[in-house]
Amino acid sequence: MYPEAKEHSKDKHINDYYCEEDYYFVMDSLEQIINEPDYVFYDKSKSGLEYYKNIRGNILVAVRIIPGKELKVRSIYPVSQ
């Protein structure tokens, strides 16, 4: 996850969590969310993968796919059921 994506996620989405502690817990669980998702969706229009995990609420990890390069996390935030 690029530093600017971390900043974006914190600045834009920290208040979407039940509490600030949940935000930090989810950020520390990023590897688990990607390695053990409840659901994965390919969004063709955004050239990306969306990993969903119920961990302190329903969480979405958006990953951009750039051909021939690494996959990078764009954002991480809570979503509704």
Image (cartoon, rainbow, N blue to C red):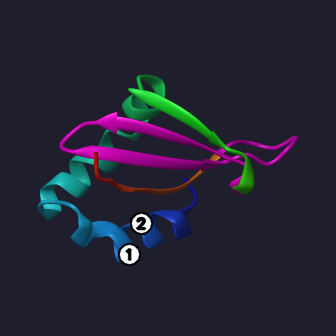
Asked where in the image residue 74 lies, by quadrant, the reply is bottom right
Picture coordinates of residue 49, whole percent (x, y): 61, 41
Label 1 neighbour load within 10 Å: few <14, some 14-19, many 20+: few
- The CA distance from mark 1 to mark 2 is 5 Å
Which of the image's four quarters has the C terminus?
top left
Element type where label 2 sits in the image: helix
- The residue lying toward the viewer, choosing from 45 and 75, is 45
**Residue hosting label 2:** 9
**63 left or right of 58 in image:** right
9 is higher (above) or lower (below) than 56: below
Specify the farthest residue to the right. 68
Label 1 sits on what residue type?
A: Lys
Residue 80 lies in the magenta-colored region: no
Residue 59 lies in the magenta-colored region: yes
Picture coordinates of residue 59, whole percent (x, y): 33, 46
Picture coordinates of residue 47, whole percent (x, y): 73, 50
Element type where label 1 sits in the image: helix
Q: Over which residues does the magenta segment extend?
A: 46-71
**Residue hosting label 1:** 12
**12 left or right of 47 in image:** left
Label 2 neighbour load within 10 Å: few <14, some 14-19, many 20+: some
What residue is drawn where x is 39% and y is 33%? 33
